[in-house]
Structure formats: C-alpha cells, structure tokens
Image (spheres, rainbow, N blue to C red):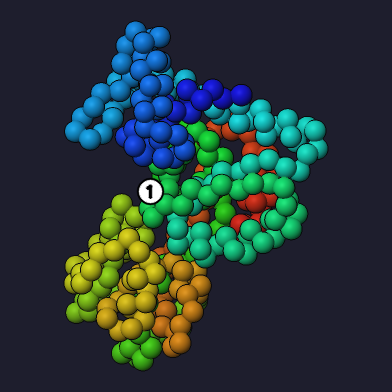
Amino acid sequence: MISKEIRYMLAIRRYGSITKAADSLFITQSALSKAVKNIERQLGSPLFSRIGNDLIPTHIGNRYMDYAEKICQICSDWNSECEDLLGEEKGQLTIAVALMRGSCLLPDVLSRFYSRYPDVQINLLEESHSVEKQLMLSPNVDFAIYNSTATDPAQTAEYLGQEEIVLVAAPGHPLAEKAMAREGFRYPWVDIRHTEHEPYILHPRDQTTGRISAGLFKKAGLTPKVLLFTRNSDIAIRLAASGTALCLAPESYVRKIHFYNPPLCFSVGDPATVTTLYAVYQKGRYIPSYGRYFIELVKENYR
C-alpha cells in the first residue's frame, strides 16, 4: 500500500545520502536519483539540499516527510489490525534495539516467540547507541527497546524491567575487602569513593550507562581517572575482568559474557544505581497481538 516513492524519500532522509539509501533499497543510485528528480519536478520544488556530502531535507522536503511518515504508520497499523481481525498469526514486527542489549535479551525471547508465531517475520534495527532515534527516523519501527531517561510526549513508554548498574572489577581485586552486604542491594556494596585512584573504562555521556555513570560520580564528588572511552560494553567488561581498569555496566551484560574466571560485581550508589528498560512506541500506534506477546516475553525475562 505504500508507494515506492515514499519509501525512497524516507530512506534518503534516514541515511543522508543517495549511495547509502540506494544500498538499503537494493536499487541503483541512478534509479534513486531519477525518482527524486521526478518527484521534485511534479512538486515544482527541491526536496533536498546538498551540504557537503550530505543530503538535507528542505522545508518543503521536511513537510513531505512528515506526511510520508503518517502514511506509512497508517498503512502499518491497518495491516497489523487487519491480520488480528482475520485471526492470522503472521505478519512483520520491526524492533529497534541496542546491539549489546539485543545479544543479552533476544536469544531467549526469540526462541519462545517463534515457537508460538513461526510465521511472523521480525526485522531488527540494531544500533550501537541512540536507539530512540530510530523511532523518529523510521516510521516502520513498531517499537524500540531501550533504557529511557526521558519520554517524548508523542511516545508511549511501557515498563519492561529494571536492573542494577554494577561496578565490574577483576577477580581478587582489593575492593572486595571493602565491600559489605546491604539490604536492597543485589551485590556486595562498595563506596564508589574508594575507587578515586583507580582507572576507569567509561561510555560516552550520550549513552545511557555513560549518563548514569556521570551522575553517580558527580553525586559522590569524584572525578574518575578515565583510561578509555568506548561505546562497546563487551570491550569495557572484558578489560575490567582482565584487571586493566574498572567499568560500570548493566548486570545482565556481565552475566551473558562467558568468562574463564568471572569478574567481581559490586553494587554502588545509595540507593542502588539502576537502569530501567522500556518498550517505546509512537502514541496511537497499533501493536498487533504478536507484538504484545513479544513485549510480555521481555517483561517475563526481567521478573
């Protein structure tokens, strides 16, 4: 029901270039360029401005995209609701999720999901960070799974679960001698100020764990000694486990990595430092029955 022209224009806005958009659409660059020129000729106005190597929508281009996204969402909602009304247990589900979060969460969830809905095709948009942007850039996304710290008024955030952000250290680290059992904490608790002379591997502040870590250090009045900034949680955790430095990470990320000699995990902050996971989707978007089932499976995973 969605015209190819609409899909073409939205792909260009998402990727910012003819080359990347054409690759994502599996068409040639010349075919895509021709389609853009045809639409611009019909409208009598350019839809994009070229700034350096990027294609940026003009004002009329942005308005075109706004309506194109609405058309896409209406078509997607209708297809999903029609399948539910007809009792068909098939369709598509497009989910945006962070790479590391997906690797920890999805194997268990997907195996159970496919046992009930074998004819539903799941499309994963896996990002290293800023998963929430996929909700704005792709109207085909049914929902995104991420640690939300603020919700857009135009979006619905459905609570999935909560976990601790833990301090990860190598086996036998001296911090273990300063740790203590405390009620309300899942792991031995340490005062983060005891790490003032320790090197850290941290995430940038535009990642959720990076923002939470920065808040934790600020509250403790601590300026961490940063050895490395990385977006890759797996690298940070493995380096911490090897004794290179300390890191802060969601507890589920640590549990899902197989170690020959597992690292130590400590609770930090008072109260405990936690991160909350949500399924976020545009308000009014129709979530099909199999989409609701997927969300319930994720909730069960966190109980």
Q: Residue at x 56, y 51 (%)?
A: 159
Which residue corresponds to the image point at 78% horizontal and 32% vertical from the top-left? 85
In the displayed structure, 116 sits above or below 234; it is above
Between 199 and 181, the residue placed more toward the observer is 199
Above or below, 220 relative to 181: above
Identify the image quadrant of residue 15.
top left
Name which residue type carries label 1: Ser
| Residue 136 can be seen, yes or no | no
Q: Is residue 100 above or below residue 183?
A: above
Residue 253 percent across, percent down from the top left: 46, 69
Front-most of 277 and 261? 261
Asked whether the viewer can see residue 49, the reply is yes
Quarter of the image where the C terminus is located: bottom right
Q: Nearer the viewer, residue 76 or 272?
A: 76
Image spot of residue 151 (x, y percent)? 44, 41
Mark 1 Cα-neighbour bin, 10 Å: few <14, some 14–19, many ≥20: some
> Horizontal placement of 156 versus 197: left or right?
right
Query: On the image, which quarter does residue 100 sit in?
Result: bottom left
Where 90 sits versus 225, above or below? above
Q: How many marks?
A: 1
Of 230 and 151, the residue lying toward us: 230
Helix, strand or loop for disc 1: loop
Question: According to the image, label 1 marks what residue?
Answer: 130
Q: Quadrant of the N terminus?
A: top right
Going by the image, does 293 lie left or right of 13? right
Picture residue at 35% right of the left edge, 17% below the top: 37
Q: Residue at x 40, y 15 (%)?
A: 38
Please state the horizontal and vertical placement of residue 111, each as a whole percent of the image.
67, 61
Query: In the figure, residue 32 lies in which quadrant?
Result: top left
Residue 14 lies, in percent from the top left, at 38, 35
